Image (cartoon, rainbow, N blue to C red):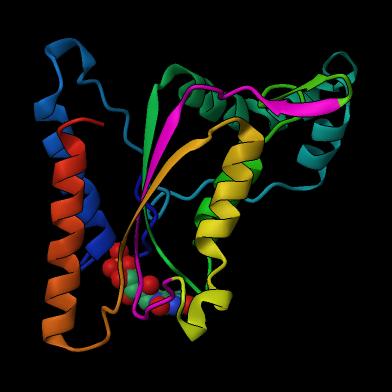
Amino acid sequence: MDTSARLTGSHSRQLGQSFVQAWQSAQGEEARQVLYRDIGQQPVPAIDEVWAAAYEAEPEARTAEMQDALVLSDELLDELFAADCYVFAMPMYNLTIPATLKAYIDQVVRRDRTLEFINGRPQGRLKGKKALVITTRKFNYRVGTEAAARNFLEPYLKAIFKIMGIEDVTFIVADQLAAGEAARTLSLLDAKAELLALAAHW
Ligand SMILES: Cc1cc2nc3c(=O)[nH]c(=O)nc-3n(C[C@H](O)[C@H](O)[C@H](O)COP(=O)(O)O)c2cc1C
């Protein structure tokens, strides 16, 4: 899944493409099927009043209008359940994930489909799936830096993926993209090398 608002010069798109190509060539024939979504270019709608009512209602109590509001959500969920693994390529925008990805997450976290309640506690139904998050940013938010406390991207995704049942999450970051040509090139090369190494066994 691509999420960057831009096509031209998008580092996250380039890194994502490099990974998927390398991963596909490392897989056997039968495992090569990739379903691609570009929510940077084709965003899914934000949830609305009818959607929220449908979310709260028991499935058998949903009106026809509520059922219609969930058609896209059901399609997105069918895709998520059909896949074994997910690759998300994303910029950091304003300290966290792009709003388009948040709109997508709101569409796919559903009480009736993504979660099941065991002894009253929610458990994610996407258990056993794994996710790779490739993320680009201008600055450095690494652990130990003063900026680390302002990074709401990795902590948020880890938390929401866990709720969905996805616990195997790998983050590969290209940062310092505004720190000059040399730092940018090195950061992108490092991220690409990490991705190519991961592609061989992921
Ligand atoms: C609206 C917007 C907000 C951004 N916010 C941040 C930010 O909070 N921290 C940061 O380090 N970079 C930020 N950036 C820079 C992008 O993360 C960076 O340019 C990244 O490479 C964009 O991904 P892309 O190259 O795939 O488009 C922001 C860029 C835009 C356009």
**Residue in the image at 37% along x and 54% along y:** 41
Residue 65: percent from left, percent from top = 79, 28
Q: Among all residues in the image, which is located at the extreme front?
A: 144
**Residue in the image at 71% along x and 26% along y:** 123
Is residue 37 highlighted in magenta? no
Residue 148: percent from left, percent from top = 51, 75
Residue 108: percent from left, percent from top = 61, 35
Is residue 138 highlighted in magenta? yes
Residue 109 sits above or below residue 81 on the image: below
Closer to us: 112 or 53: 112
Residue 160: percent from left, percent from top = 62, 45
Residue 10 sits above or below residue 42 on the image: below
Residue 75 sits above or below residue 16 on the image: above
Residue 156: name its quadrant.
bottom right
Looking at the image, residue 109 sits to the left or right of residue 93; the answer is right
Q: Quadrant of ligand 1?
A: bottom left
Q: Which residues are magenta?
A: 121-142
On the rendered image, what quadrant is the N terminus found in? top left
**Residue in the image at 53% along x and 71% along y:** 151
